[in-house]
Image: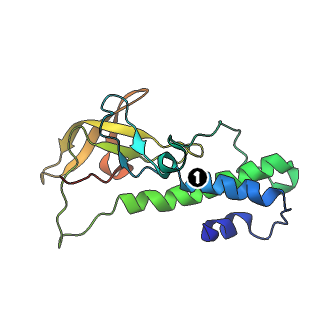
């Protein structure tokens, strides 16, 4: 948490009232990361998050305007807090998703993504605390027998995505 806080806040002078606000928003971002699929939810994809353990349900935030490209001297106090949260979200989600998508070279062989697997779809334009959870509908294999492309079902329809844009959630091995 400190690593991202230092990166986002930098040398900005923050008051005593602003610090808990930023820390709470950083905490919400970190505790919204999906851990694994909830097995009872097959139609509507839902994932277990640290927020489920803290408050009993996933953490949510109201959508806000994008302040990431606005200069800091033109922002009000609240807009600055939102800009800090948006910068943190971009940095942290870019660091978090590749950890879920570890690909090993030829010494170790990993299994292909299968139909019905819940995955996170990478998207740089997702607002804070939102994760694109989708379910694999159809997999398309290449000439080597490995999955290259998959059709995924999201809330807005079915899309065809390359495998490097999909991050499978950890599955409990029974």
* Residue denoted by label 1: 29
Residue drawn where x is 26% and y is 67% of the image:
104
- Residue 72 in percent (x, y) is at 82, 56
Q: Is residue 9 above or below residue 163?
A: below
How does the figure colour the protein chain or chains?
rainbow
Number of numbered discs present?
Answer: 1
- Residue 145 in percent (x, y) is at 12, 51
Q: Quadrant of residue 44?
A: top left
Q: Is residue 36 above or below residue 116?
A: below
Q: Quadrant of residue 105?
A: bottom left
Residue drawn where x is 73% and y is 48% of the image:
82
Q: Is residue 122 visible?
A: yes
Q: Is residue 69 visible?
A: no
Residue drawn where x is 66% and y is 51% of the image:
86
Specify the farthest residue to the bottom. 107
- Residue 18 in percent (x, y) is at 81, 57
Indicate left or right for 157 with 75 as reference.
left
**Crowd tier of the residue under label 1, counting other residues whose Cα lies within 10 Å: few below 14, some 14–19, many 20 or above:** many
Residue drawn where x is 44% and y is 56% of the image:
97
Q: Is residue 61 above or below residue 89?
A: above
Q: Quick one: 71 or 65, which is closer to the camera?
A: 65
- Residue 15 in percent (x, y) is at 86, 62
Indicate left or right for 15 with 153 as reference.
right
Label 1, secondary structure: give it: helix
Q: Quick one: 46 or 4, which is closer to the camera?
A: 46
Indicate left or right for 18 with 100 as reference.
right
Indicate left or right for 103 with 2 as reference.
left
Q: Quadrant of the N terminus?
A: bottom right
């Amino acid at each position: 948490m400190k690593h991202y806080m230092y990166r986002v806040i930098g040398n900005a002078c923050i008051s005593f009232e602003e610090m808990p606000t930023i820390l709470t928003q950083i905490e919400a971002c970190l505790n919204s990361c999906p851990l694994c699929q909830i097995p009872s939810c097959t139609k509507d994809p839902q994932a277990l998050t640290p927020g489920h353990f803290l408050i009993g349900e996933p953490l949510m935030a109201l959508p806000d305007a994008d302040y990431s490209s606005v200069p800091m001297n033109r922002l009000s106090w609240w807009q600055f807090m939102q800009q800090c949260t948006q910068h943190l979200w971009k940095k942290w989600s870019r660091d978090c998703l590749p950890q879920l998508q570890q690909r090993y070279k030829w010494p170790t062989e990993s299994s292909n993504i299968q139909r019905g697997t819940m995955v996170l779809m990478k998207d740089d334009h997702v607002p804070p605390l939102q994760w694109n959870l989708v379910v694999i509908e159809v997999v398309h294999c290449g000439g080597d027998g490995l999955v290259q492309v998959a059709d995924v079902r999201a809330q807005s329809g079915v899309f065809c995505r390359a495998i490097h844009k999909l991050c499978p959630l950890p599955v409990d091995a029974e």
